[in-house]
Image (cartoon, rainbow, N blue to C red):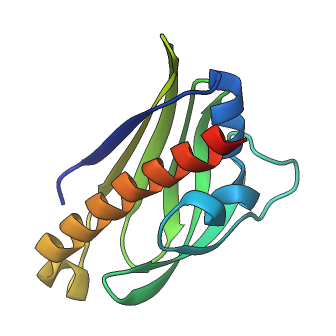
C-alpha cells in the first residue's frame, strides 16, 4: 500500500496541538473511524509504551495493538503495530509556522488477505479518514 500522508495548519501553539493529538484519551474526539483508543502500559506516553485502538475501516471493525517507537514532545511521535489485521506504522509531526502549527500524519501499511484484495478501496478510505481527522482536530483545537 502506498504511503498515506495528510497535513493541515492549526491556529494553536505547537505544544497544545502535540499534547492533544498524542493523548490517546482524546483520540475518539477527532480521529474519524476510531471507536476506542488507550495506552495499555504503565508510565503514560513514552517510547516503548503500548497501545490499543479499535477502528472502523472499509466496513470492518479492526483492533490494532502496538508500541510507541518515537516520542519527542512537542515535535514528533511514531508508532508501529504489533498485532492487528496487517502490519502498519505511522507518525505525527508538529512544526511551528507563522499562524500556528503544521500537523502531518503519515501511515505505511502492508495489507494482506481481504485487505490486499481491497487495497485500492482501503487506500481511498484511509486517505479520506486521515484528511477528515485532521480537519476535525483543527476544529476541536481552534474551538478552545
Q: Residue at x 80, y 59 (%)?
A: 41
Residue 97 or residue 86, whichever sits in front: 97
View extreme (front): residue: 143
Q: Quadrant of residue 114?
A: bottom left
Image quadrant for the N terminus?
bottom left
| Residue 4 position in % (x across, y down) | 26, 50
Total numbered labels placed on residues in the image: 0
Is there any visible trace of residue 21 in the rendered image? no
Image quadrant for the C terminus?
top right
| Residue 9 position in % (x across, y down) | 44, 30
| Residue 38 position in % (x across, y down) | 72, 65
Say above or below: 37 vs 85.
above
Residue 133 relative to residue 38: left or right? left
Say above or below: 68 vs 14.
below
Residue 96 or residue 89, whichever sits in front: 96
Residue 33 or residue 9, whichever sits in front: 9
| Residue 115 position in % (x across, y down) | 24, 81
Residue 73 relative to residue 83: left or right? right
Q: Residue at x 45, y 48 (%)?
A: 134
View extreme (right): residue: 43
Residue 128 or residue 135, whichever sits in front: 135
Residue 46 relative to residue 123: left or right? right
Q: Residue at x 35, y 53 (%)?
A: 131
Q: Residue at x 35, y 51 (%)?
A: 107
Is there any visible trace of residue 57 in the rendered image? yes
Amino acid at each position: 500500500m502506498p504511503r498515506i500522508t495528510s497535513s493541515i495548519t492549526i491556529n494553536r501553539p505547537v505544544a497544545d496541538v502535540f499534547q492533544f493529538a498524542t493523548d490517546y484519551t482524546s483520540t475518539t474526539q477527532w480521529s474519524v473511524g476510531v471507536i476506542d483508543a488507550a495506552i495499555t502500559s504503565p508510565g503514560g506516553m513514552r517510547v516503548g509504551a503500548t497501545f490499543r485502538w479499535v477502528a472502523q475501516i472499509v466496513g470492518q471493525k479492526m483492533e490494532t495493538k502496538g508500541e510507541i517507537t518515537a516520542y519527542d514532545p512537542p515535535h514528533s511521535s511514531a508508532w508501529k503495530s504489533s498485532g492487528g489485521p496487517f502490519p502498519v506504522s505511522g507518525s505525527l509531526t508538529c512544526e511551528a509556522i507563522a499562524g500556528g502549527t503544521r500537523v502531518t500524519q503519515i501511515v505505511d501499511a502492508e495489507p494482506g488477505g481481504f485487505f490486499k484484495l481491497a487495497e485500492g478501496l482501503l487506500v481511498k478510505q484511509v486517505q479520506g479518514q486521515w484528511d477528515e481527522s485532521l480537519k476535525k482536530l483543527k476544529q476541536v483545537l481552534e474551538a478552545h
